[in-house]
Image (cartoon, rainbow, N blue to C red):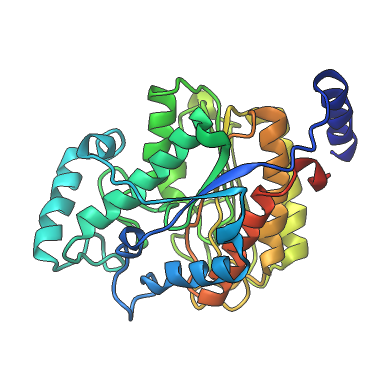
């Protein structure tokens, strides 16, 4: 891998000049509208998650970086939601949003007043991230939506704190609006991204690499390594299950498989990273023992690969994480990676 990347650097430098661009502009979404996606202070997925991230972001002076554009949340439309979700389910969420009672799944994802509008801001911000990256508006090459990455929602139901699957909708828009035929989704959240994997299991245009805690020990209990896609899509997916207490070294070893997969199978036009922070040591819901160095490592490698393979197009989504210090460390590590010069990651 090192030899191949080094060759690419020499090749690009020779034919296109220096690539030490230094200025890899990144859009970061922040606003109270995103914080409204939360299920109450006693719930693991609460509004404090966003503000903890933002406090660390500001403490690192990232809000003052000329390589970062702060973007306000944008709402999705009902038509956007229907690109992925069933109409009956969307209507159910709309009605539940008015009443604010009950659950949208078997008990993890409660309804609250305004849940539809809050969910639309999550989806809309992820779609705006895609538009910025695809259009390179104001030089934007990468984008980060901290509350995006709701990878458990299915077409017809919620799941695991996820109401609408912004990732699935983003993929549908990337295909329909931009005509992309090779999309690579990388998920490093401790939980398997079942809502993305199974909805695109037979779609060969969507390559998926998912590193997660073994489903025998953690929700949703899926993501066996034997699952590699179905039909014509067989071989376009990889699931990597890690045992409880796996650490940074285990993660790096596993990520080598992801890099090989991206280089040899995915060859994407767009990379989507779900960078859930719940694999970091001390998360109350999981059993992995990463540090935020795992997030920095994954982001460094994907950042470089995005420039090698798809003109820098990379959308990062926050995903899970229920220890607020871990969220702050993990997500700011991702951003610091994306605004660094990508040839530093060799």
Position of residue 25 measured from the top left corner of the image (x, y, whole percent):
61, 43
Answer above or below: position of 321 versus 224. Answer: below
Answer above or below: position of 162 versus 310. Answer: below
Spot the residue most to the bottom: 42
Q: Is residue 2 visible?
A: yes
Q: Seen in the image, is 105 located left or right of residue 187?
A: left
Q: For the point 73% across and 65% down, which residue is it? A: 248
Position of residue 147 measured from the top left corner of the image (x, y, whole percent):
42, 58
- Work out whether residue 229 or residue 295 is closer to the camera in this orientation and state it: 295
Position of residue 139 measured from the top left corner of the image (x, y, whole percent):
57, 35
Q: For the point 28% across and 46% down, which residue is it? A: 75
Position of residue 122 measured from the top left corner of the image (x, y, whole percent):
35, 52
- Work out whether residue 28 or residue 334 is closer to the camera in this orientation and state it: 28
Q: Is residue 198 visible?
A: no
Q: Quadrant of the image for the N terminus?
A: top right
Q: How many marks?
A: 0
Q: Quadrant of the image for the C terminus?
A: top right
Residue 250, quarter of the rendered image: bottom right
Q: For the point 27% across and 49% down, which residue is it? A: 120
Answer above or below: position of 168 versus 135. Answer: below
Q: Seen in the image, is 99 located left or right of residue 305?
A: left
Residue 10, quarter of the rendered image: top right
């Amino acid at each position: 891998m090192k030899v191949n990347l080094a060759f690419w650097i020499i090749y690009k430098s020779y034919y296109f000049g220096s690539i030490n661009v230094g200025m890899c502009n990144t859009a970061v979404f922040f606003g109270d509208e995103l914080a409204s996606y939360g299920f109450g202070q006693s719930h693991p997925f609460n509004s404090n998650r966003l503000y903890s991230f933002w406090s660390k972001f500001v403490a690192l002076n990232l809000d003052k970086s000329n390589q970062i554009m702060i973007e306000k949340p944008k709402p999705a439309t009902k038509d956007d939601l229907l690109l992925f979700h069933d109409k009956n389910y969307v209507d159910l969420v709309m009605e539940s949003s008015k009443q604010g009672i009950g659950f949208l799944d078997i008990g993890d994802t409660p309804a609250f007043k305004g849940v539809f509008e809050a969910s639309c801001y999550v989806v809309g911000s992820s779609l705006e991230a895609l538009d910025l990256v695809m259009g390179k508006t104001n030089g934007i090459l990468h984008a980060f939506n901290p509350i995006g990455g709701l990878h458990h929602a299915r077409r017809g139901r919620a799941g695991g704190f996820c109401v609408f699957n912004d990732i699935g909708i983003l993929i549908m828009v990337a295909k329909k609006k931009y005509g992309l035929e090779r999309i690579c989704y990388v998920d490093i959240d401790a939980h398997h991204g079942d809502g993305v994997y199974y909805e695109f299991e037979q779609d060969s245009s969507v390559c998926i690499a998912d590193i997660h805690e073994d489903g025998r020990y953690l929700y949703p209990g899926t993501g066996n390594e034997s699952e590699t896609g179905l039909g014509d899509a067989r071989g376009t997916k990889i699931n990597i299950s890690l045992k409880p207490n796996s650490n940074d070294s285990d993660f790096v070893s596993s990520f080598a498989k992801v890099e090989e997969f991206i280089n040899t199978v995915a060859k994407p036009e767009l990379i989507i990273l779900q960078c859930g922070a719940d694999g970091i040591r001390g998360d109350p819901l999981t059993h992995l023992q990463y540090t935020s160095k795992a997030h920095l490592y994954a982001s460094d490698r994907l950042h470089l690969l995005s420039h090698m393979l798809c003109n820098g197009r990379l959308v990062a989504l926050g995903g899970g994480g229920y220890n607020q210090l871990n969220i702050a460390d993990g997500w700011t590590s991702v951003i610091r990676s994306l605004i660094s010069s990508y040839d530093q990651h060799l």
